[in-house]
Every structure is written in C-alpha cells, then in structure tokens.
Image: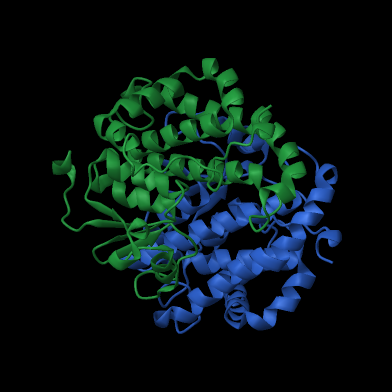
Chain colours: A green, B blue
Amino acid sequence: MAGMVTQGATYELFYWPSIQGRGEFVRLALEAAAAPYVDVARLPAEQGGGAKVLTALLAATDGGGPFFAPPVLRHGAVTLSQTAAILQYLGPRLHLVPDDEASRLKANHLQLTIADFVLETHDTHHPIASSLYYQDQQAEALRRAVLFIRNRIPKYLGYFERVLETNVAGGGQRTVGAALSYVDLSLFQIMVGLGYAFPRALARMAAGLPRLVALCDRVAAEPAVAAYLASPRRIPFNEHGIFRYYPELDP
Amino acid sequence: MAGMVTQGATYELFYWPSIQGRGEFVRLALEAAAAPYVDVARLPAEQGGGAKVLTALLAATDGGGPFFAPPVLRHGAVTLSQTAAILQYLGPRLHLVPDDEASRLKANHLQLTIADFVLETHDTHHPIASSLYYQDQQAEALRRAVLFIRNRIPKYLGYFERVLETNVAGGGQRTVGAALSYVDLSLFQIMVGLGYAFPRALARMAAGLPRLVALCDRVAAEPAVAAYLASPRRIPFNEHGIFRYYPELDP
C-alpha cells in the first residue's frame, strides 16, 4: 500500500494526543493508505511533541493560519485545518477518492454532512457548553439524548444507508465510486463511535441498516485498518472525546 | 460585474424560500458577483418553484445526491450541497477567491469554521432539539445563551479579527488575499446576523473588533451588495432562521 503514496513529504498530523476526536478521521485515512505520517503531538516533548506544539501551530500565521482548532495537517509547504478539508486534500494523494470531479464533489458533501453529525453527537453530552463538565449539564443532556436517539441518529444513518444503496458503482458496498474511500472510513468511525456511546440504541437500529453494518465490517477487515485498530496507535474510546459512554444517555 | 462570470450556465440555488439561513451565504456570493442565478424554491409553483421542488431534489440520486439538507446548487451538469462546498465551487468562478492554491485552502478552512459557528449559533435557541419549539427548550436556551455570549462569540469573532489583522496582503481589510472574497461576505452575514440576534452583546464587543466592524461596513457598501440588501430578494431576518431575536437571550 505504501506505493500508493505519490508524494514524498511525510504527513504531519497535529491533534490532541489523548483522544480519537476529529483527528481520528484523518488518522484512519493515513493508516488505511499506509501513508508515512507523524502524529506530532503524541511524540515525547523532547522529540518535538506535546500539546504545546499543537497550540503554537494553531496560532502561527506563516502557513494559512491562524487556525481555529485541530486537526491540522502539514505536508511540505501546505498547512491546513478542518477535518473535511484535510480529507479532501488527502483523498487524491492517498487514492481514497475516485479520480472524477463528480465523485470528489460527492465525497466532500458527504464528509461535510458527517462533520455536522459529529458536532450534533458531541453536543449530546454537552448541550449547554463545552466549557462546563458533563455533570453540570446532565439534566439537559438526558433530554437531548432521548431525541438524538429517536430522531437524529435514524435521520443521519438512514441517509447514509440510502447513499450506499443508490451508489450503483459501488454495488451498495461503497459510498463513493467502486473502491474504498475516505468517506467509507469516516462512516466506519461514526458507526463504531455510536456503537460505543449508544450501544443499546444502535443494536435496536442495526437490522434496518444492513449496508452500513456490512460496510463497517468490511472496513475493519481491510488489512491496514485491522493492523491499525490492533495497534497502540489507536487510542481507545474514552470520556473526553466526541463519543462518550454514559449509560444514562442510552437507556 | 457581470463580465466576471466566466461560465455560461445559470446558477440554480435550492433553499428554503422564507428564511436567510445557510442559503444566504450562497445568495450573497451570487449577488456580490452579479452572477445569473435563480432562487428556485422562491419561484411560484407554476414556474417550477416551491419547497416541494427542493425536497424532490434532495432525494434525487442522478446528480451527486441524495443530499442531506439544503442549500443545493445546480450548475449545468454539476449538483452539490453543503454551504462551504458550494462556496468553494463558486469562488473561482465568481472571482471571489484568489487564484493561488494556498489562498483557496485558507478560504475553505475559514468557511468551514464559519459553518461550525453557524451551527453553534443555531443551537443557542435550540439546545435540545430542532424538532422542538423554542418555547419548549427556553430554560436550556437561556443557560446556553449566557455562555455563548460570554465565551463562544468572543472566541470566534476574536479569531476572525486576528485573521484580518494577520492577512498582510489584505492590509487588515480582507480575510483572504487583497480583494473581496466569499469569506468576507460570509463574515458580513455573521456580523449582521449576530447584531440582529444579540444586539446588546454585540454592541458591547464592537470596540474590540475594529477590523470586523470595518469589514462589515465595507461589504455593505459594495454596490452590488448594497443593491441586493435594499431589494426584496433579501429576505428579512425572522424567528425561523439561524439568527433569531429573543430579547431574553440577550440581556
């Protein structure tokens, strides 16, 4: 797979070192393509790592910044932020999107819809403010989660199930085109993340989402993805990221 | 300005006909460039307009869809959704972004950050669920709005003020490059929208945001923008869109 990487410079990912978060969508693409990359903030401080490196890069103004938030990707002279923009940049370079313009536009709008879903998912445990602890907005979170499970998960996942179903080139198995794309990888992450945070809700819905469930299994079985998931590079889910398991939110 | 439009096909915008919403960021770009466009859902039903046309297009699978939500732009054989993706497509065609790749990447990440801010702003009056009335989540909205005003507006607007300040090519007057861009237009919309929804909060902050305030005045004075804002094509702010005025949320 390393031969698929057509450009020489090593990719440098800057993201919080202790969570999957939004950075995970980028990690999955880099890993699935066996691309040469460094997860910079996870390096020891004496090797140039640590969260301070990340916050300094956000504020820097010499390469497209300042940036509002991580993830940030640096590749040679290019520095860019926003998950969907990073994947749009990486897609052609990692052969994780078809060559034609229509497919690339489709991949981008799907990824942007995933970004919206991610933000909605995060706010399920933080409906009032990110600056407050979950415990200080638990009553509101309980109210939001019920409706998120009832209305929003089915709306988003039902949509992506339809995207799979109607992608003729992919035979119902791929979201865009006929081969593995960064959108497939991101939907895998959405499915396992929701399965972590809302296992009971997702189990009830699985029968109605056969293509998404199958996609998930297929992505997990990709050799490079399977190797990554089994490695210490895959940070376990925890209660600091987007997908958090609070049993009371998944009755 | 019409001479700036380099492609022949008329742009067709599909968006809810009675609100500014996310569609307004696209309308502003089309209007500022005096591009030939049709705001399809606002046409009378007998001319092919109405919200049903929009919902049918969202579900259609023959041109990049199905799409999750409007706005959707159709241009010749191209159909795409997601505000930031539409502006990324329109930018070069309407001469609303510089020619170089670095500037285009920067414009895109700024626009995606604006999209995040828009979603956060919307949820200020709908912190529990879009499916509930504001009145049914007013207590939570009051709690969220206080922190949104205290922390989030200053964080986002402070960031964009710094973007203006550090854009040397624009002399502190443009977000990207030296000329008017779609990001400038979107920040104008953010500022007037926040000024509508949170007039007291924004008045308190204005002195600390001199470049954003000046940008806003400059955009409003662009002849094509001024003509648009004075026309019936500009839908007035109302309590159905992203920016809503509920006095109790802006004490």
When asked about the image quadrant of residue A220, the answer is top left
Pick whichever, B23 or B200, lies toward us. Answer: B200
Please state which of residues A145 and B12 is positioned toward the viewer in this rendering.
A145
The residue located at (56%, 69%) in the rendering is B224
Screen quadrant of the C terminus of chain A: top right
Q: Position of residue A84 (x, y in %)?
A: 42, 49
From this view, report whether residue A137 is shown above or below residue B175.
above
* Viewer-nearest residue: A72 or B98: A72
Q: Is residue B242 depicted above or below B46 in this figure?
A: below
Could you tell me residue B181's position as x and y percent? 47, 68
**Residue found at the far left of this picture:** A3
Q: Is residue A227 above or below residue B203?
A: above
Q: Write the residue at 35% across / 46% down.
A: A27
Q: Report x, y in % for residue B242.
A: 69, 53
Instruction: Report which quarter residue B245 is drawn in.
Output: bottom right
Q: Nearer the viewer, residue B131 or B24?
A: B131
Question: Which corner quadrant holds the N terminus of chain A?
Answer: top left
The residue depicted at 33 percent of the width and 44 percent of the height is A233
Task: Identify which residue is drawn at 72% across, 72% down.
Answer: B202
Is residue B241 in sight in this rendering? no
Position of B154 compared to B249: left or right? left
Numbered disc total: 0
Asked if one can make out residue A108 in the rendered structure from this viewpoint, the answer is yes
Residue most extreme to the top = A207
Q: Position of residue A57 (x, y in %)?
A: 39, 69
